[in-house]
Image: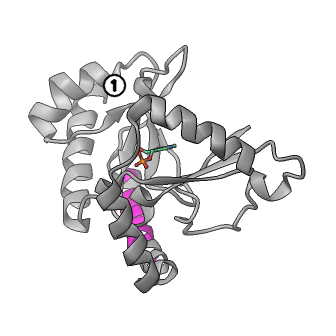
């Protein structure tokens, strides 16, 4: 069982949930994490918590795939983690991201046309937007949202293994500034109200 948890530490509300790995008494769970989401997006360095026998197999597979991650970056990260209070950093960033998320949620409530819904996640970096059925978010983004609203989002269809729901999108709230969130949701809302009523 693979537990893929790069957003686990980014929780703004609700209760911290135990990891599946913490219940594992038989060495069956492989827990994955990433420094990209809690420290620096460009790092693309992750980690695995698993039994040694599994780690050894993963190391062999890794060397077939891309030999190894960049050694210099791993050394730099190792050095940084010796001196840097990552927990304090994550606590600080949770406050920053929670404010951005709450602003985005409040604006979506004001700006979206009837029939559009969105999630209010307790953590992570994204929320999930669903427009009324029959709307193709990819086409809408290319033909309307980007040229007219100057808003780029990830059409949800890219995130389904099968039977994609094309009327969905993933919205990121961590990267844009509060000002950009306000501008982006206002112009997206205006264009969506014009196009789908
Ligand atoms: C669910 C999930 N797992 C893994 C990853 C990969 O993380 P990384 O930035 O370390 O490549 C991502 C992010 O892009 C993700 O969303």
Dominant secondary structure (helix, strand or loop) of the stretch shown in magenta: helix
On the image, which quarter does residue 100 sit in? bottom left
Tell me the residue that label 1 is attached to: 137
Residue 197 against residue 37 in the figure, above or below: above
Residue 72, position in %: x, y?
Answer: 30, 60
Q: Quadrant of residue 49?
A: bottom right
Is 13 left or right of 62, judged from the image as shown? right
Dot 1, how many residues are within 10 Å of its Cα: few (below 14), some (14-19), or many (20+)? Answer: many
Q: Please identify the quadrant where the C terminus is shown.
A: top left
**In this orientation, does residue 156 appear?**
no
In the image, farthest residue toward the right: 25
Picture coordinates of residue 14, whole percent (x, y):
66, 67
Residue sitting at 49 percent across and 21 percent down? 165
Seen in the picture, residue 139 relative to 55 is either above or below; the reply is above
Which quarter of the figure is the N terminus placed in? Answer: top right
Magenta-colored span? 95-108
Q: Nearer the viewer, residue 178 or 86?
A: 86
């Amino acid at each position: 069982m693979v537990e893929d948890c790069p957003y686990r530490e980014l929780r703004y509300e609700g209760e911290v949930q135990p990891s599946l790995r913490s219940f594992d008494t038989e060495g069956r769970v492989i827990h994955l994490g990433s420094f990209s989401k809690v420290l620096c997006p460009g790092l693309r360095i992750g980690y695995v918590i698993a039994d040694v026998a599994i780690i050894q197999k993963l190391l062999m597979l890794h060397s077939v795939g891309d030999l190894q991650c960049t050694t210099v970056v791993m050394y730099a990260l190792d050095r940084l983690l010796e001196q840097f209070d990552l927990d304090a950093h994550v606590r600080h960033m949770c406050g920053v991201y929670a404010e951005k998320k709450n602003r985005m949620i409040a604006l979506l409530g004001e700006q979206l046309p009837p029939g559009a819904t969105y999630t209010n996640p307790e953590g992570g970096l994204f929320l999930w937007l669903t427009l009324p059925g029959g709307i193709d978010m990819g086409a809408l983004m290319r033909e309307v949202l980007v040229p007219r609203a100057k808003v780029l989002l990830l059409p949800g269809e890219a995130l389904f293994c099968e039977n994609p729901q094309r009327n969905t999108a993933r919205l990121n709230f961590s990267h844009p500034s509060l000002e950009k969130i306000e501008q982006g949701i206002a112009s997206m809302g205006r264009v969506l109200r014009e196009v789908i009523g």
